[in-house]
Image (spheres, rainbow, N blue to C red):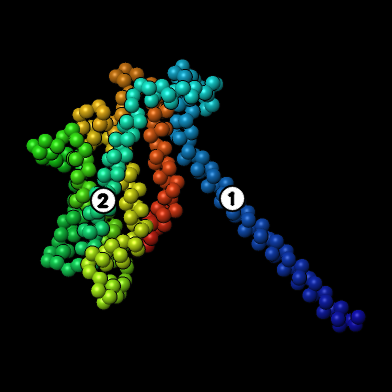
Amino acid sequence: MSRNNVLTAAPAGRLAQQRAADTARFRVRKYGGYITAYVVMTAIAIVFMMPLLWMISTSLKSRTEILAWPPTWIPEQPLWGNYAEAFAKYPLGRFMLNSFILVIGCTIGELVSVPIIAFGFARLNFPFKRVLFILMLSTMMIPSQIKLIPLYSIYSQLRLTGTYVPLILPSFFGNAFFTFLMVQYIRTIPRDLDEAARIDGAGTWTVLYRIILPLCRPVLTVMIVFTFLWVWNDFLQPLIYLNDFATYPISVGLAFFRGRYSVEWNMFMAATLVSILPVLVLYFFAQRHLIGGIASLGLKG
């Protein structure tokens, strides 16, 4: 090999080594960043899960172990019978069934009313549309507690107290928050789709149910999840409108574990853990659509 070839090969070899070293450092930084991010997110997740883990731990303890100091995370002898005792003391199954009835009724009401109202504000032209839209949004500024007295008076005069009608009927008139979200989402859908459908002979209802609603799946998912959470956790309205023990939802039924002078924490935590299982299942199956729906609403709204 000539001297020129040797001099040329030496820099080429050093350049290849330098590139390999740069590639190795890049991979170390890349995967090191991934590992650090996962470790940090796992630590944050554990912190946020601590109340749930403590609830599980307390539900398996005896009464004396709950009040022991210092507190322990792992029960000495797990008492799985606390769950059976909680169901035997109060009809938790009936309470949860009542909650499901309220959730299904309110969800159907929102899915029937909100798309129609939102489509009217987003696509149709009628007198005083802007004024009515502002009035609808202004209702979001009124605390719900202020409306309880006049609404109770109306339902009482109609002899509807003690039934589920006062809890389900308002959902069939639309929720202002959901209506606003859906109006903003529908406005991002091109009007060309509506015009193309009308050229093919589609009417207003066909455009709504065949064109608009299939594209509004993210916002509909948000509506269903939020309705489920609000109705499932609502305590004040069922307590006011219902007066029969057999009609109480789970949110009111859990309050019976709190006595005047003491609280049966082990059974209370067991019942509470059972009551949040439907919420966890809902989030598990809807998390992808829910996160995507909230992100798209934030970008398009």
Mark 1 neighbour density, 10 Å: few (under 14) some (14–19) many (20 or more): few
- At a point 52% along the width and 23% down the height, the residue shown is 78
Quadrant of the rendering where the C terminus is positioned: bottom left
The circle drawn on residue 218 is: none
The circle drawn on residue 110 is: 2
Q: Is residue 89 visible?
A: yes
- Callout count: 2
Residue 239 falls in image quadrant: top left
- At a point 33% along the width and 34% down the height, the residue shown is 96
- The answer to whether residue 281 is above or below residue 28 is above
What amino acid does circle 1 point to?
Thr
What amino acid does circle 2 point to?
Glu
Q: Are marks 1 and 2 in contact (CB under 8 Å)?
A: no
Give the image location of residue 40, x and y in percent: 55, 47
* Horizontal side of residue 134 vs 295, given as left or right: left
Give the image location of residue 209, x and y in percent: 28, 62
Quadrant of the rendering where the N terminus is positioned: bottom right
**Which structural element holds mark 2?**
helix
Give the image location of residue 172, x and y in percent: 21, 49
- The answer to whether residue 244 is above or below residue 227 is above
Residue 119 falls in image quadrant: bottom left
Q: Relative to the observer, which residue lies in front, 85 or 299?
A: 85
* Horizontal side of residue 53 vs 28, given as left or right: left
- At a point 32% along the width and 39% down the height, the residue shown is 100
**Residue bearing mark 1:** 36
- The answer to whether residue 60 is above or below residue 225 is above
- At a point 21% along the width and 55% down the height, the residue shown is 137
